[in-house]
Amino acid sequence: MTTDEGLSPYPFVAQSTTVGAGATIGLVYGVVLRQLVSVGRIVALVLLALTTTVAGFAIGTSDTATITDAAGIIGNLGLAVVVPVVALVFGGAALGDLREDKTLVYLWLRPMRRFPVVFGAALAALTLVVPVAIPPVVLGSALTGVKEGIVIATVLATFVASLAYVAIFTFFGVWLRRYIVWGLAYILIWEGFIALGSAGVAQFAIRKYTRSILADITGADLQLADFSAAAGIGIPLAASIAALALASLCLARQDVD
Amino acid sequence: MSTVPLPSGRPTQPPPPSADQIPSPGPPPTGAPFTPPTPAQVAVPLDGKIIVDQVSKFFGSVVAVSDVSFAVDAGVTALLGPNGAGKSTLFRMMCGLTPTSRGTVSVLGADPRTDCAARSRLGLVPQQDALFEYLSAYDMTVVAARSHGLSGSDADAAARWALEQVDLADGDDKPVGQFSKGMRQRVKVAVGLVNDPEVLILDEPLTGLDPVQRRRMIALFHRLGDDGRCVLVSSHVLDEVARLGSNVLVVAQGRLIARGDYHDLRGLMDDRAHRIRIGVSDPRTLASALVERGLVTALNLEVGTRSDELVIDTADVDGLGRQIAPLARELGIRLTEMQPLDDDLESVFRYLVEGR
């Protein structure tokens, strides 16, 4: 206990003026992961993801299902709705929820560089997106019953999509107060409507690249899937890094409550 | 140090005198509007662990802080102001949580908004009641220690030390989400202390504490200040500030309107005209007698809806207090109530800002 006479001495500890990147990532990862875990949220998102499983099963029951039918379900439901929405909920909340509940100050006002903070938060979001979104979509692809590499392609495409969307929506969470609204607008209006109407605009949509992975590996005939699998992986990865860099810049300029 | 009411702005001519050269304007003439002091009275040498130099902050068209300058050094300093005065915005700028619109803020010679290392020497207890709800007090403090670069047993030792300072060392494994408001406040202070900061900024830290904890917390702030740390505490409660120490900065409407010794501030309050409601069986007779004796500067018999009360302005509260009971006895009238109408912080601010 403290005494009335004076303060008990601060313990002899090794203090530093900045926190290393590894320590920052580990700390933020743990804090954000625990903050993101909510049973209700996970159950709701698993149920959403299971729609792809059910759709895959329905395709599989048809004797005339082709690889294009199977890839279409994965591309139009799994990659266009399930993965982005799950990534939006977790990626946006990674730092967005901390800002909303005003606990961001406990990470912001610390001798930590901004990029590792953002990276740790995005990693925590990815840790939840991968098990929630990918298995049901991959299971759906397996249940279609077509054999032309659809499962491998789905694993790769959903993982790349998860990475890219988590990074983008982590940026949205830092940048925008109503990140869910803007994120849904991005998914449904930009990627789902505007990008479909023009090949030029589609180059700014993650969906185009993940569909390309699917089409390139399986040989399915998918709209807007005219890149190679390598480009389909490389460009979303580059976009992810850019999104995280923007998020860290935005975090540094943030008005924190 | 004397209490020095300040107008907005920091003069550049003549050169600022040293702190002990700053003359006190003294109490304003009784019952007269407050007169802003001359530039020589308000110039403040800017040297200290925290330097706020001609800082303004605008949120759109709203001016939250207007041209504020001051410096704070080791010891406890209270930032006093009513709700919405700009205290939290000033604190946020000092911590770098929001940029200034104009002017500069320096904490330990650096800008904490851009200087990563400067943040390692700074502690903040924010006003908002926000904690990681699922963590225990110990875990929350360990997380804070780790966020300052401590690891393993160092983080543990620092967390235990910080919790000890706020009487939470006994260990309660409950998540802080289940804590009372007072306990949460203490956890926030422990989090702010865990890196042994040279500058500790506490935004309304006494809110929600019971009287015993409030007293212990104030004692802790004094011990931290006595140890050479710069401790800046905000409050909108005048009595809290009385116990926080003699160094007071008074902020109202986004401006720094006075700084100096609490007792001088209190004296300034006591020396101005006071408005008092008197419940009395015969207001007219008492009013005449008070005027004859020069105890009132103004009176109003029509203010109250009741016919048995009188509202007076007096410059001599002590004299009135001594004389009114014998006077009532002498006049054969009965006093039922004496109620100060402006003995609160808001009225002090109004007086300092508007001279009324």
Image: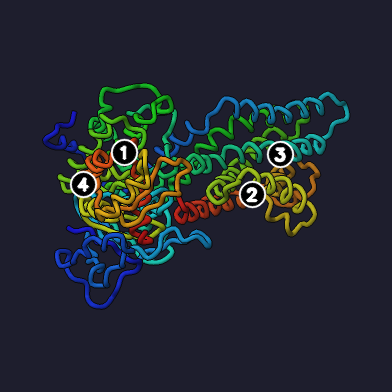
Work out how far the residue at label 2 is from the one at label 3, CA to CA, in angstroms. 23 Å
Indicate left or right for A109 with A178 as reference.
left
Q: Position of residue B249 (x, y in %)?
A: 28, 55
Q: Which residue is mark 3?
A: A81
The chain letter under disc 2 is A
- Which of these two is toward me, B331 or A27? B331
The chain letter under disc 1 is B
Mark 3 element type: helix
Q: Residue at x 35, y 42 (%)?
A: B278
Give the quarter of the figure containing the N terminus of chain B: bottom left
Q: Which residue is mark 2?
A: A230
In the image as oriented, which residue stretches furthest toward the left? A5
Q: Which residue is mark 4?
A: B245
Q: CB under 8 Å between callouts 1 and 3?
A: no
Marks 1 and 4 belong to one chain:
yes
Q: Residue A200, labelled with which disc?
A: none
Label 2: few (<14), some (14–19) or many (≥20) C-alpha neighbours in 10 Å: few
The chain letter under disc 3 is A
Q: Residue at x 27, y 34 (%)?
A: B214
Q: Residue B333, labelled with which disc?
A: 1
Label 1: few (<14), some (14–19) or many (≥20) C-alpha neighbours in 10 Å: some
The amino acid beneath tag 4 is Gly
Indicate left or right for B53 with A146 as reference.
left
Work out how far the residue at label 1 is from the one at label 3, CA to CA, in angstroms. 84 Å
Marks 4 and 2 belong to one chain:
no
Label 4: few (<14), some (14–19) or many (≥20) C-alpha neighbours in 10 Å: some
Q: Position of residue B277 (x, y in %)?
A: 36, 44
The amino acid beneath tag 3 is Val
- Which of these two is toward me, A98 or B296? B296
Q: Mark 1 or 4, which is nearer the eye?
A: 1
Q: Quadrant of residue B179?
A: top left
